[in-house]
């Protein structure tokens, strides 16, 4: 598993924790770890397989080191699986829209049952209005060039 893949999974965990309105420290820890892993010049998987201490990587403590190990050895993270039991995985792709955060994405999902970028684009192209603040709707329309 590449550093980029590990970082993306940690980003996803952070996103879904934010959707759940989890502890800000926990959300931030996953984001910081994702950034460190993404930028780390050595393969995290190679380090793990060589028995190196992952906690020497900035932002990776004992708990997150264990999560990285689980991800590499088992191929999944229990915390992400639990979050995906509550939310569709496709909600994560909506985080690509600049200026739209997890709370706005959650409101779109709960109000309109929209769970992907494709559904969101189709909704807007059909002339429907989102029940969110106008500036956010404008950002979304700009993203889709509608």
Image: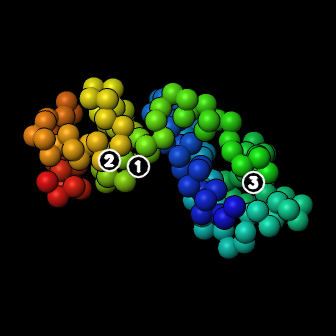
Q: Position of residue 66 (x, y in %)?
A: 78, 45
Mark found first going from the N terminus, 3 or 2: 3
Q: Residues within 10 Å of mark 2 (few under 14, many from 20)?
A: some
Q: Are marks 3 and 2 in contact (CB under 8 Å)?
A: no
Residue behind mark 3:
72
The quadrant the N terminus occupies is bottom right
Q: Judge whether 113 appears above or below 94 on screen.
A: above
Quadrant assignment, res 83: top right
Mark found first going from the N terminus, 3 or 1: 3
Of 54 and 118, nearer the camera is 118
Q: Judge whether 124 appears above or below 46 on screen.
A: above
Q: Is residue 64 visible?
A: no
Q: Position of residue 45 (x, y in %)?
A: 76, 62
Residue pushed farthest bottom? 41
**Element carrying mark 2:** helix
Mark found first going from the N terminus, 1 or 2: 1
**Element carrying mark 1:** helix
Q: Is residue 66 left or right of residue 125?
A: right
Quadrant assignment, res 137: top left
Residue behind mark 1:
93
- C-alpha gap between disc 3 and disc 2: 29 Å
Q: Are marks 1 and 2 in contact (CB under 8 Å)?
A: yes
Q: Position of residue 92 (x, y in %)?
A: 44, 45
Q: Residues within 10 Å of mark 3 (few under 14, many from 20)?
A: some
Which residue is drawn at the image coordinates 19% and 34% (left, top)?
130
Disc on res. 117: 2
Q: Is residue 112 left or right of residue 38?
A: left
Of 12 and 65, nearer the camera is 12
């Amino acid at each position: 598993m590449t550093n980029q893949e590990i970082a993306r999974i940690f980003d996803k965990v952070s996103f879904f924790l934010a959707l759940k309105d989890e502890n800000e420290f926990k959300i931030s820890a996953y984001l910081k770890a994702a950034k460190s892993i993404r930028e780390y010049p050595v393969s995290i998987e190679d380090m793990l397989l060589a028995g190196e201490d992952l906690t020497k990587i900035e932002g990776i403590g004992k708990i997150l080191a264990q999560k990285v190990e689980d991800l590499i050895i088992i191929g999944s993270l229990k915390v992400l699986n639990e979050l995906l039991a509550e939310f569709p995985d496709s909600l994560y792709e909506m985080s690509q829209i600049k200026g739209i955060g997890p709370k706005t994405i959650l409101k779109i999902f709960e109000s309109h049952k929209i769970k992907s970028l494709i559904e969101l684009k189709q909704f807007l192209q059909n002339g429907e209005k989102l029940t969110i603040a106008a500036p956010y709707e404008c950002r979304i329309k700009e993203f889709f060039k509608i």
